[in-house]
Every structure is written in C-alpha cells, then in structure tokens.
Image (spheres, rainbow, N blue to C red):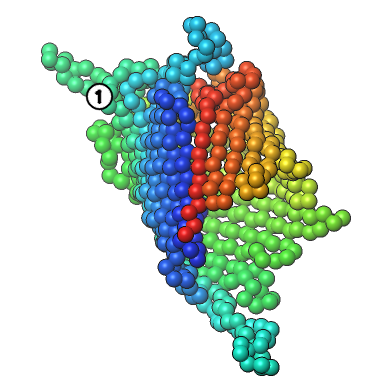
Amino acid sequence: MLYTPEAVRFYDTKTPFTYVRYQKNFQTNESADVLAGDFGVNLGKSLNVGLNFDYQNIGGFYTQARSKDARYRVFASYRGDRYELYAYVANDYYKQEENGGITNADYIYNPERYTNSRTKVSSRDVPVLINSGNLTNRIRSGHGYLAQSYRLGSYRTVPRKEAPLPGVDGELASLDSTYFVPVAALSLTTYYNKQSRRFFSHTEDPLWSTVFGTPTITHKRKQSDGSEQSYVLPNDTAQLVTLQNTVALSLMEGFRPWVKFGLSAYLRHENRWASLPDSTTHRYAKDVALSSTFIGGLIERREGTGLNFSTRGELGILGSDLGAFKLEGDIRTAFRLFRKSFALEADAYVDNARPSYFAAHHHGTFGWWDKDLKFTRRIELGGKVHLASWGTSLEARTASLQNYIYFDSKGETQQHTDLLQVLSFRARQMGSTGPLNWELEAAYQQSSNTSVLPLPLVTAAADVYLRFLVAKVMRVDLGVKGYWHTAYRAPYYLATDQQFALQTEGNVGGDAPLLIAYANFRLKRARFFLQMYNVGEALMSNERLSMYKYPYNPMHLAAGVVVDLNN
C-alpha cells in the first residue's frame, strides 16, 4: 500500500513508455474507481526519469465504508560505469471511513429472514455499529530516497571473431568489445520519511463510547447555567519523522575468476522523532528523539552455477537500539536428477529487536498507555524443495517467538513472555494440459498458543482457467479463483488504533470458499478483464466474513483495462 525503498521499481528503456490501468465496478451506490499509471523515459543512455501515480475512490458496499487513496512518486536513475544514482520523492495519502463492522451476522448467514418480500437484502441494509458521524482514519506519508554508489574497477577488452571489412575484399578486421569490470564500490544511501495518522470525527455522538468503551479523554464545555457538560469527540494524532543514512563498502563478486562471492560492510545511523498528544493539552508535546547506530555485513554468492548463498548480520552498537541484532541467511542449489530439474533452498533467521515506539506508547481517546516493553526474540528455520519439471514446490517452516507482542480485545499492546512455537507446511502445484491450466496451493499451520496467536489450521487457494487464442491474435483466459480456510478466532480490526485485536466471540471461516470468476483478454498492447466477485453467493450458502464483523463484499461485476503505450 505504501511506497518503500525495498519495493519501488526503476526503469531503463530505449523508448518512452506509458502504462495506464483503469478499473471500476458496475454498481450505482457502491461505485469503485481505480486509476493508476507509470511513465518512464531515458534521456540518453544512462539517465532515466519517470512518474507513478495511483488513485482509488471506493464507495464501499456497506454503510460508512468509503475509502479514498492517492499516491504518486517521481523518480530518476543514472547508471554509468563508475557512478550510479537512484532517487525518488513520493507521497501517500489514505482516508478510510470507519463503521466498526456489522452488528448482526445473521443478515449474512440467513438473508431471507430480512427480505421483507424483496428478492434479496442489500448490503446497505445490513446494520453496522457506526452508521453516522463520519468517523475517519487518515494516514499521510511523505518520503525521499537517494542512493549513490561509486565503483572502482578497470576496463577490459575482449576480442571478438574477425569479420570482413566492409567494401574491402579479402581483408579482415577484429571487432573488439570493451566493458567495465567493477572491483569494489563505496555507497551512501539516505532515506527521509514523515508519517502522520489522525483518527477523528467532526460530530459528537454518544455512540463512540457505546462502541469503543470508556474513553480516556473527554472534553468539557460550559452550559448557559454555568455547569459543565462532558462530551467525547475523537481527534487522535500521531507523527513519526525518520532519517536514515547508510555508508557501505562492497567487494564485487566475480571480478576475478577465483572471487566466488561478494562481500559488503555497512554503518547505518537512524534518527527518529515521535510525537504524541500531551495528557493535559491534548496537543503535541515535545518530540521524543530516538537515535540508533548499527553495523552490519553481507556475504553472498548469486552468480554460481551450483551452490549460491547469502548471509547478513546486523548489530545495534549505540543509542536506543543498543544490543539489538539480526542474523539471516539462505543457501540455494539446483541440479538435474533422472532428467528432471530440482532446486533446494534452506534459510534461517534470528532477531532480537526493540519494539517500535508506537507499540510501547499510544495516546488516544479510547486507549492511553506508556509501557516498557522487552526485546522481542525470533528464531525461524525453513526449507523448500522445487520440482520444476513437475511444477511442484514443498516448504516447511518453524518459528520460536519470545516476548511476542499482540493486541488484546481492547486494542492495547500486551507481551507474551513465554515461548511461542509456530509450525507450518506448504505445498504448491502448477501445471497445464492443453488449454487447461491450474495453480493450487495449500498450507497447514499450528500455533502453540491460539489464545495469543490464532491461526487457521488449513488454508487453501486455487486458480483454474482455460487459455486459448481467438482469431490467432487475442489471448483469452476464462477461470475461477477460490480461497478457503478452516474456522478460527480471526482478529478484529479496531478502528481506534488500526490494529488487529484478539476476540473470542466468534469464528471466521470453515464454510463455503470465496469464489471469483473472471475473463482476461489480451490484444497486442491492451489488456482488459471482467470479474464476478464472490460468485459463490449465487451458488451456495456463503458465510462471507473476511474478519470478525467484517464481511466480504457481496457478488458484483467489475471490469478493468490496462494499456501499454510504448512510444
């Protein structure tokens, strides 16, 4: 949902391109419009500039559920032999109206009881906890990123096969190729991020206390007779400003035949300024300044034909994260056996981390705490087997968690000091025969303490579709996707702090799957689709809950188009 340095994409293209996506549904009162696009152009061989944008205006199928999202990113990259630069500035804006969930799930389970001689119950007829007052959550995030590196190395010339000189009979010329071989690199990465959240309403309503419990903040006003009247009007705010600078020195893999891996060392300094309301004035008090310094290193082999691996380590040496550390590594290999392709992977992860500031501190109308949380500890081990010739993947994972942080039924952070174990197995199968294609996936998982970390025991997903050509030019996919999991005490989304809180009042899942029928069409540079969401509602009894008190959207038709305007 948010732009992050790890997820953004940069481009290098010989010709300018514009990539536009538009999507909407065919509902009148519950309209949904999505418009997104990417633009990129190279200014010379080394410099690229571009723009991303994404706008969504979703009316929502249930009362008081409208959301509006807008974000954009302006980016540039320069890739020379010795100097490289990647940079962007971006803004994210998200606004979500809150309804607290539905009050009576029987409207979903047995809609025929509430039709009143109509053919069906509209989603707008399903009662919600908050149906007025415009209670809203808003998130803003503005950030800038700049990564620079200077590489040390030398140019090498590789002779190519001799070729006849044009226009000269019998004479040959050697066509040599010159390229740059990097040996080492020095890099500096800077990231700035300013985030803010506001939970507010412009309307006083006793409903706030009914839904969220006893408030920790109340306001008072004087009456005409001189007495004071208390009222509740949510207006919670929080802000975090982050500045990171990382200096790294790297030794490149493969600059000599005997150099079989790359090696990097880095120093990262983080400054964070957190702001929360004061208990007296309810305005921002003095910022809490946090500073941390980390050292880390990476050793990896990515270009080998046999065994590849990577290992990364990080240690907090100064500041608020003193003593925090992280170790992670993986090993990968691929081979052929009985004329079949196999790949094996194994990974490990160890983490000793200080909880985030906002997990330990929250100042809001319906929750106020300042806690001294202990470091969380996590040890995770995993292994994968890929049978590429058969389209099969198998995975097993286990995790040991200590001082695990969770949110109780009131949305307040708690810490489980005992050891918590999680075990999971996952299988994936992809294949095709003629026009029929399928992608099947299932997982089994178990938590040693379901009252702290509830998980569905079994989850499954399937995508089955027919792929064929029409008039030899238009590719068509006709298929159905399905999602299902066993019943469990799924967490409840709590609007007051936008976290997923534990609940013991009801199960979610275990009945009919969520089914989505679709038709995809691709014609040259254009793609478009039709989708019937939650089509199972017309075929079977459908529980239709994605979370406790939050149902899936009812069955509806949506369409979209994607156009690649490569100039």
Judged left or right of residue 385, residue 411 is left
- Judged from this view, the residue extending furthest toward the right is 338
Q: Is residue 552 left or right of residue 51?
A: right
For residue 213, above or below residue 39: above
Q: In the rendered image of this protein, does residue 57 appear above or below residue 341?
A: above
Disc 1 residue type (three-letter): His
Indicate the position of residue 15 as horizontal and vertical percent values. Answer: 48, 63
Residue 99 position, x and y percent, is: 41, 23
Front-most of 280 and 311?
Answer: 311
Which quadrant would residue 333 be assigned to in this image?
bottom right
In this view, 17 is above or below 556:
below
- Which element type, helix, strand or loop, lies under badge 1? strand
Q: Tell me: residue 237, above or below residue 85.
A: above
Q: Quadrant of residue 453?
A: top right
Residue 427 is left or right of residue 517, and the answer is right
Residue 63 in sight in this render: yes
Q: Quadrant of residue 402?
A: top right
Identify the residue at image location x=43%, y=42%.
35
Q: Residue at x 12, y 15 (%)?
A: 224
Q: Position of residue 158 (x, y in %)?
A: 64, 83
The residue depicted at 46 percent of the width and 35 percent of the height is 24
Foreground pick, 60 / 508: 60
> Mark 1 highlights which residue?
219
Q: Residues within 10 Å of mark 1 (few under 14, many from 20)?
A: few
Regarding residue 243, the answer to whether it shows in the image is: no
User: In percent of the image, x 85 and y 56: which residue is there?
Assistant: 339
Numbered marks: total: 1
* Residue 435 image offset from top left, x and y in percent: 73, 42
